[in-house]
Amino acid sequence: MATAVLLGLPLFVVAYAALQLLLSGDHSTLSHLWQTVVPEYIRNSLILLAGVAIGVMTLGVSTAWLTTCCRFPGQRYFQWALLLPLAMPAYITAYTYTGMLDFSGPLQSAIRDFTGWGYGDYWFPQIRSIAGAVMVLSLVLFPYVYLITRAAFLQQSTATMEAGRSLGLTPWQSFWRLALPLARPAMVTGTTLALMETLADYGTVQYFGVTTFTTGIFRTWYGLGDLQGALQLAAMLLVAVIALIMIERWSRQNARYEQSSQRQAQPFQLTGSKAWLATAACALPLTLGFILPALQLAAWSLDRWQVWTQPDFWGLAFNSLMLAFIAAIITVLLALWLAYGKRQFPTRPIRATVSFAGMGYAIPGIVIAVGVMLPLAALDAGLIAVAKSWFNWNPGLLFSGTLVALLFAYTVRFLSVSLQTVSAGLAQIRPSMDESAQILGYQPPQVLRKVHFPLLRTSILTAIILVGVDVLKELPATLVLRPFDFNTLAVRAYEMAGDERLADAGPPALMMVMVGLIPVILLSRAMLASQHVVLKEHELGPVTP
Amino acid sequence: MALLHLDHVHVQLGQHNVVKDVNLSLQAGDIGCLLGPSGCGKTTLLRAIAGFQTLTQGSISIADRIVSNPKTRLAPERRGVGMVFQDFALFPHLNVADNIAFGLRKLAAPEREARVNELLEHIGLPGYQHRFPHELSGGQQQRVALARALAPKPALLLLDEPFSSLDAELREKLALEVRQLLKKENITALLVTHDQQEAFAMADKAGMMYQGELLQWETPYQLYHQPSHQLVADFIGHGVLLSGIVNAPGSLASPLGMLQHQSLQHYPAGTPVSFLVRPDDVVIDPNSKLQATITSRGFRGAHNLYGVGLPDGTEILTLSPSHEQLSVGSKIGLRPEFDHLVVFAADHCELPGNQASPLPLPEAQSA
């Protein structure tokens, strides 16, 4: 319970602000915000959400259906390759597209060389715009929809699909009339996840000059020094996120009419131009979402090869990895503590704690940063006051300006990632396994060592990797809470891009993407393995005595 | 000498009295079987014997040593009992050999290997040492789970619905195999099941549990032919309870006519009673004066199970070899042939919550 209170503290601070906003009479800051920026934030956020929703659904659902229910050249590779965009942090993709499509970028330069036009002689879409942000976020986030919808398509009852075909449906018709309606809950789940990430995004919208709540919070806090205003904006953002969480939970509940089946429906064999169209439809999002940005990063990194030899750069890498590692260890230990607590004592408060701790991932990093900063700053102020009056000594900022604050924020945000992984691992150790080990003469500690540890090892490692990589990529919370002069790869890439030194952002970005590939590989292996199990059971057929 | 002895055992789970005043003894080398509908407390009782549940009253002793009473509970790992779980609970990260050897860590490696090989031989899976549980079929997993439990030569083996996740054919075959294996290893075993065929195939002693109480603890033969309780009569085997009136000591007026039996001796004349009619207690006899009408026919392979309507409207069951087909609606003669007449006083105590449920009839099959 204490754990829940501690982890919930940042959320309570922001939620309290939200309540205060609604109830108290003090609307001076608020009404000022309302009159000036809030309508713009809301408008931009809504445009972003709508655009990204359309984008991720189009890209995610079409690729999911093609790779599961059709056969065409490259289909087997696309199955896992379509997850690759997940390795790209959105703001990094934004930098690369700016590099490629800006006035001085290779494309526009080529157009000018070819036509002889100069500046202002021609129209070219401006990538640093809200439309650009929609495009970048859609390209990076569509794998969420792809992954979840794909699982839904794979689970759809063979009989339903075969009945459809026997009634004369073409591939196209069976997609629109059967597969799509059946997969609707999965599509909603995947899309809400992508929208949560959209609301949490800071790097992309900031770089593209789109003012949303995240940039607004940052500006109000740092630019105007108005912590109260930042808190109120954070509270508004939190309300929007909670609405998304509720939609997501509701859609999961409605997912019940998905029927599972052991056998996958006979896929449609596409031939000729249809087959190549399908290949192109899968290759396009993959190229735009991963290959082109990655190539651009590689080009920048080659161009700035000397960066790789500088000790300063490796210092950054060390900072990043160290933070990632410590945060991962903390969250995994906490997750083990909570998961075991739930397993051994499934009381109401413990179950509530566990489900509450699972919410952090949906909360934007900047909101958590605000929620962490306020109570820790107050704690520090109190400590300094006490130390000064009692010992006439100023201990300085013990929490708010140090790594403690940063690690606390990471823990709040990423605990759910490790908790999910560890709980899933623990769920496969049934209570009867403990009991059978015990009855075969093992003391409880030995049961942990001989049965639990070997079975949990993979989940623990996976959790460490997933959390570590998320921490590595996390920008807004790091930006706000890092100690003075403490830099990470993410912060460096952000600063370089902000200084219009895009090529210098290349090496740190490339490094993050390479590390970010590890969980994507894990994910794609798990995805293909679970499908393999389904196929294997089908091959074996019913067990005959 | 009783290897397992339960003395007035009570177990409480939360607020519920799940096991109430159970007394039971199992001789060394015998196989016992607890029957009963789901939720009757049989699994809880088994877990109490294993040491996973604390008693609220009474005591449990294994080989004349008290292992459980309300004050103390010897840890499961120190009781020298083995247990086969309903879901088998094989360790997925260990292969078959390592699963079986899990409880043998006190043995030296060569002896351990020898024991594992011996058991694999016994369960008919030689050469399976290096398979993993997920590569085995349900029946094979079940056998490995059994071998794992048997490996340390426990004094007492507990089996919790060991065959329930297998299909019917396999279940019957394995039940016999397991009985032979237990006898070969001379292991005392207690089995929990809701399947009476399983109990009849396995058990030397069997009993039925209902709402936490053990209603009878005798041989399966006695359970079937001499049920001491209406509920036992009801649950075990096919049968119908008919009512009648004792009109003279040793004689009963019933829908089947006058029945004479020594078990009626101690009922005074005029006592209303109910008595159990098994399908094999009445035979079809064209010469009998007792006429009845066939109301249903269920094909059971070697024989047919008929539902038969008596003149007064009550229905009973009877068996007849299946090569002589009788059609529904036809008139037959019936002759009672009771080896045992199981009689309950009409006001015989019924456990709370047991409504007079219709007795199991064969599935009707129109001819």
Image (cartoon, rainbow, N blue to C red):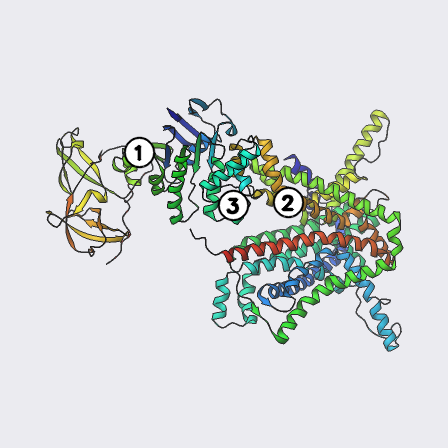
Chain under numbered label 1:
B
Q: How far apart are marks 3 and 2 (CA)?
A: 28 Å
Q: Where is residue A275 in the image (x, y as percent from the top left)?
A: 63, 72
Chain under numbered label 2:
A
Q: Image quarter for residue B41?
A: top left
Q: Where is residue A88 in the image (x, y as percent from the top left)?
A: 74, 57
Q: Which of A218 and B218 is in front in this view?
A: B218
The residue wearing badge 3 is B128
Chain under numbered label 3:
B
Q: Earlier in the sequence, mark 3 or mark 1?
A: 3
Q: Where is residue A85 in the image (x, y as percent from the top left)?
A: 71, 59
Secondary element under disc 1, as helix, strand or loop, is: loop
Three-letter code for the amino acid on which mark 3 is drawn:
Tyr
Assess whether mark 1 and mark 3 are in contact (beta carbons under 8 angstroms): no
Three-letter code for the amino acid on which mark 1 is drawn:
Thr
The quadrant of the picture occupied by the N terminus of chain B is top left
Visible residue check, residue A10: no
Assess whether mark 2 and mark 1 are in contact (beta carbons under 8 angstroms): no
Taking the image as shown, residue A87 lies to the left or right of residue B272, namely right
Three-letter code for the amino acid on which mark 2 is drawn:
Ser
